[in-house]
């Protein structure tokens, strides 16, 4: 958090957006949709993946305007903002990173969007403890930070009828051609999941993590799934209709998908 909280604990100017955003000066990942303010560069508040998700969920029979969403890992609230701006009924968003949680609150107040509740806590613990059910789970940039991604998908399936997922997955050819991705893995870690062997790939975050600029998982490493294993787990847990599109980015092969139970 910015030193402004300790060196200048009182605001002395007329309330304005930049003053609130500067509580995290230089530490925003997202570009907020406000003219004339200084934040980050990533356009998560205007991310086309949100519209893509809602479009395909509606096509698969989910009335998103009547749907309660559970969002896992909202980061700074950009996708939460996009969901309510595009008409979903409500969003409950679980964020474990304390700084990111506070940034979500600042962004919500600065932009004035409603129908979103941000909760500070571990999403896996929440999924295991809650008795609530949701129409849709929205998980963008979340699964590949999990140590047990198969269990994560199982818990999601126990709490929701539909899922939007954007995630990086392990692809051997991509790793072979990108030494930095290969260097982050220490090989295959097979597990047995409901009668099938699933190949997990341990991905380390490296040494000396700067948590003021790191928005990954809470552990020193995570496990990436292979694409077919990921879809196998979804189907085994009741998601019968899956629509996916593949992408590439510097961090690895990625997919976005919607999955719906019949």
Image (tube, rainbow, N blue to C red):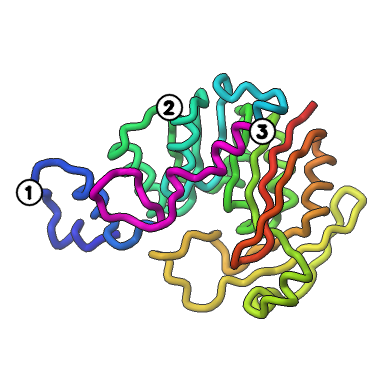
Residue at 60%, 38% (x, y): give it.
Answer: 52
Local packing at callout 2 (Cα closer than 10 Å; few below 14, some 14-19, many 20+) is: some
Q: Mark number for residue 56?
A: 3
Residue 64, image quadrant? top right
Residue 225, image quadrant? bottom right
N-terminal-most mark, 2 or 1: 1
Find the distance from the CA under tag 2 to the CA under tag 3. Answer: 22 Å
Find the distance from the CA under tag 1 to the CA under tag 3. Answer: 47 Å
In the rendered view, does 175 fall on the left or right side of 38?
right
Residue at 66%, 24% (x, y): give it.
Answer: 62
Q: Mark number for residue 93?
A: none
Q: Nearer the viewer, residue 195 or 243?
A: 243
Q: Is residue 8 above or below residue 159?
A: below
Q: Is residue 118 above or below residue 177?
A: above
Residue on which the image places disc 1: 12
Local packing at callout 3 (Cα closer than 10 Å; few below 14, some 14-19, many 20+) is: some
Q: Tell me where the magenta segment starts and ends, as one range.
A: 29-56
Is residue 159 in view?
no
N-terminal-most mark, 1 or 3: 1
Q: Quadrant of the N terminus?
A: bottom left
Q: Mark number for residue 115?
A: 2
- Percent from the top left, x then y, of residue 254? 67, 57
- Percent from the top left, x then y, of residue 201? 74, 67
Q: Tell me whether circle 2 and circle 3 mark residues in contact (CB < 8 Å).
A: no
Residue at 84%, 58% (x, y): give it.
Answer: 198
Q: Please state which of the two labelled residues, at mark 1 or mark 3, is closer to the viewer.
A: 3
Q: Disc 3 on helix, strand or loop? A: helix
Q: Nearer the viewer, residue 213 or 53?
A: 53
Q: Residue furthest top?
A: 66
Report the number of discs: 3
Q: Disc 1 on helix, strand or loop? A: loop
């Amino acid at each position: 958090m910015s030193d402004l909280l300790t060196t200048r604990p009182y605001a002395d100017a007329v309330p304005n957006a930049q003053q609130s955003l500067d509580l995290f000066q230089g530490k925003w990942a997202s570009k907020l949709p406000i003219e004339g303010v200084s934040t980050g560069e990533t356009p998560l508040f205007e991310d086309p993946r949100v519209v893509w998700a809602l479009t395909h969920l509606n096509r698969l029979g989910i009335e998103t305007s009547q749907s309660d969403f559970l969002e896992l890992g909202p980061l700074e609230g950009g996708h939460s903002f996009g969901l309510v701006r595009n008409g979903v009924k409500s969003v409950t968003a679980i964020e474990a990173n304390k700084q990111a949680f506070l940034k979500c609150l600042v962004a919500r107040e600065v932009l004035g969007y409603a129908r979103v509740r941000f909760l500070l806590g571990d999403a896996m613990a929440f999924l295991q403890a809650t008795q609530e059910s949701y129409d849709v789970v929205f998980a963008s940039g979340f699964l590949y930070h999990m140590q047990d991604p198969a269990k994560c998908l199982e818990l999601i399936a126990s709490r929701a009828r539909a899922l939007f997922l954007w995630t990086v997955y392990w692809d051997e050819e991509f790793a072979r051609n990108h030494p930095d991705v290969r260097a982050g893995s220490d090989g295959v870690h097979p597990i047995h999941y409901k009668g099938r062997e699933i190949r997990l790939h341990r991905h380390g975050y490296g040494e000396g993590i700067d948590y003021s600029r790191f928005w990954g998982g809470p552990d020193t490493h995570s496990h990436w799934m292979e694409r077919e294993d990921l879809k196998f787990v979804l189907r085994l847990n009741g998601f019968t209709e899956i629509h996916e599109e593949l992408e590439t980015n510097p961090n690895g092969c990625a997919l976005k998908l919607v999955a719906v139970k019949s």
